[in-house]
Image (tube, rainbow, N blue to C red):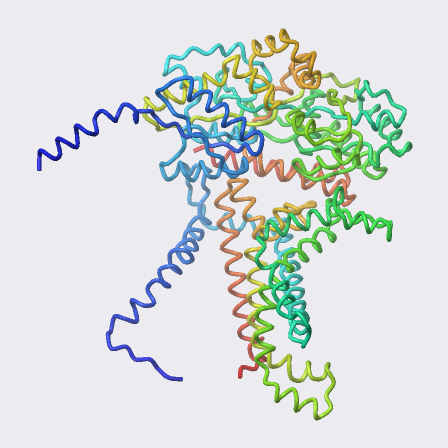
Amino acid sequence: MQRTVFRSRWLPYVLVAPQMAVTVIFFFWPALKSLQLSLYQVSPFGDKSTFIGLANFSKLLRDPEYYESVGNSFIFAGGVTVLAVLGALVLAGLATQKIRGLAIYRTLLLWPYGIAPAVAGIIFLFIFHPAYGILPYLLSFVTAYDFNWLLKSWVAMSLVIVATAWTHLGYNIAFYIAGLLAIPASVMEAADVDGAGPIRRFVAIVFPLVSPITFYLVVLNMVFAFFESFGVIDAVTKGGPGHSTEIMVYKLYRDGFIGLNLGSSGAQSVILMAMVIGLTVLQFRFAEKKVTYR
Amino acid sequence: MPALALTLALLLVPASPALAKTEIQFWHAMTGQLNDAVNSLVKQFNESQSEYEVKPLQKGSYAETLTAAIAAYRQRQAPHIVQVFEAGTQTMMLSGAVLPVYQLMKEQEIAVDWKDFIAPVVGYYSKDGNLYSMPFNSSTPILYYNKDAFQKAGLDPTKPPQTWKQVEEFSKKLIASGASKCGFSTGWPSWVQVENMHALHDQPFATRHNGFDGLDTQLLINREFGVKHVAQLAAWQKDNIFSYGGRGGAADPKFLSGECGIYMQSSALIGGFTKAASFKWGTGQLPHYGAPYKRATSIIGGATLWVMKGKPTAENRGTARFLKFISDTNQQMWWHVTTGYLAISNSAVKNLEAGYHFKKNPDQFTAFAQLTKGQATANSQGLRLGNFVQIRDVIEAELENIFAGKKTAKQGLDDAVAKSNEMLKEFAAANKQ
């Protein structure tokens, strides 16, 4: 790799300064603030603030509901990641075939990403609502099973997973299409000549060649599911029924912004942050070894 | 350049009287038609005098408005007036960030006939007999029923169910005749079915006079009455006599689509239902179990206007004038007729009665009847709990577990009480210093 040499000693620092400033102001500073907040018991208006050490953490770790939200987060993030990444790979595979009107299909596939999560939630609400949704109505002709996610946990969880995965699908598809198009035609032709079928070609050639993208998307989708999937849940289930779709970031929001319990909310965000950093490090250490960069 | 400065000064001076209007920031959470009503009310005030200009600003949901006001207060940028829902009352009272309205009016020497305010509303927001925030939009839950469905089921469409037994009986008929798929549903599960049902049956919701007498309070909803009612709802859920429809107003479509023939929800929805329902409907008072329980009044919900402290006296004067303006009889009558929220003064109610408003709009009277004709007791004054928003969340989550059959009514309510008591203890500890 070629090293760029700057003649001025200061220029490189000036060039990275804006990015550093953004990172420090919008990431490090709030992170430090929540770390500080997590050690205090704070009244909503901030007039009474007592240092209580790690009491916010120990209270969380004794709370079965907190563990429930951790469990929910993993189910949710796992579901969203698998669905959004695998679904994107399949759809991108289809969208790189030689078919008529390809540009239109590709555009349509990317569309959902342009929809705000909260709006996506509302759309799913209209489709799936037990009282006025179209799908439960149609399903009632097929099965007597009542898909009432207002009371059935697994239906509620599946619903928010599907809705969230759908909003993120377009983003993943864009990456996969680029990845698939970058595979040299000669390699595929060679495989063809050797008599490899479509499945064999996919497993032996395509999958390894797009593995860097898969790896990147898995990390990104997981982080997205942990941190930014709040809109869909707020619009559809509000964490219910019971606490069964209350993922960590949603509990944090409810405790902090609705319940005004800032200390506990701060502690939750510190744990969440540590957990996502840990998961990402793990992925880089183990999964990356299986990734083939070209 | 003194000459230029002088010229500029001369140019600016004559313009200033027109700019001298003192601005009063008013943050609220009213959306849709209600937002229009707020803007119209503010316009009436701004046009009624020339010294002050109230600037209304919609800040999102109740919770978002409160969070925004708190953030602004901490930056010393608080609005003069902020609308806070009833569940935030204790938080506001103990915040040290507010100027109680009774004190504001006293400081500004503006006479307000506090005795004219209707008791259930004033009681909820007073401490030691003094009103802390100005009641703005108050409502109470009532019963709505689908007259067309009643007709179809062979029920008298002029007679809403009055007891829970009748609710069950009517629901069965509605379902059996195919007039509706489910019997009844409810909005705001904790507010309507737990908080108000305890008040209506003269049962305490929490110790220490529902929290009015001190911070060392504990919930009592897992006692005989609470368990009986919630267990009954859970049993009815199995037969579709009751059909759970979610938190807040999420169940409204169940009534509006005709799925459930009976619905319990805030009286403030009269306006919305008038616009949205494609069938004839009527209202009645909330159902009661009858003896051995006494019948007390229901309690109110909604929001009040809080005055943030730390503003100059001159600005506080504008705030006081505005609050006085909205509590006046004429504005109260206008507000009630326009929005469906309760008029908060007895004189406004009397005038509305004299103007045959209630004769023409009997549904608008149901809430008043429930609040004024019942017996006001210590249990029906209201609830004064810290962390109340979270406590409601806890109760509603447990109700969902119970209705889903994951827990029995007793287990679920025991769990809700244990968790809530922990939150109450925390609130008391945080506010003791």
> Whole-percent x and y of residue B336?
59, 19
Q: Quadrant of residue B148?
A: top right
Residue farthest toward the bottom in the current orientation of the protein: A194
* Image quarter of the N terminus of chain A: bottom left
> Whole-percent x and y of residue B419?
62, 40
Q: Foreground residue, A247 or B58?
A: B58
Q: How many callouts does the rendering have?
A: 0
In the image, residue B70 sits, relative to residue B267, either above or below, namely below
> Whole-percent x and y of residue B96?
42, 30
Residue farthest toward the front in the current orientation of the protein: A100
Q: Residue at x 74, y 46 (%)?
A: A133
Left or right of residue B328, residue B187 in this image: right
Left or right of residue A98, residue A134 in this image: right
Q: Foreground residue, A212 or B190?
A: A212
Q: Residue at x 44, y 53 (%)?
A: A35
Q: Foreground residue, B257 or A288?
A: B257
In the image, residue B264 sits, relative to residue A48, either above or below, namely above
Q: Quadrant of residue B100?
A: top left
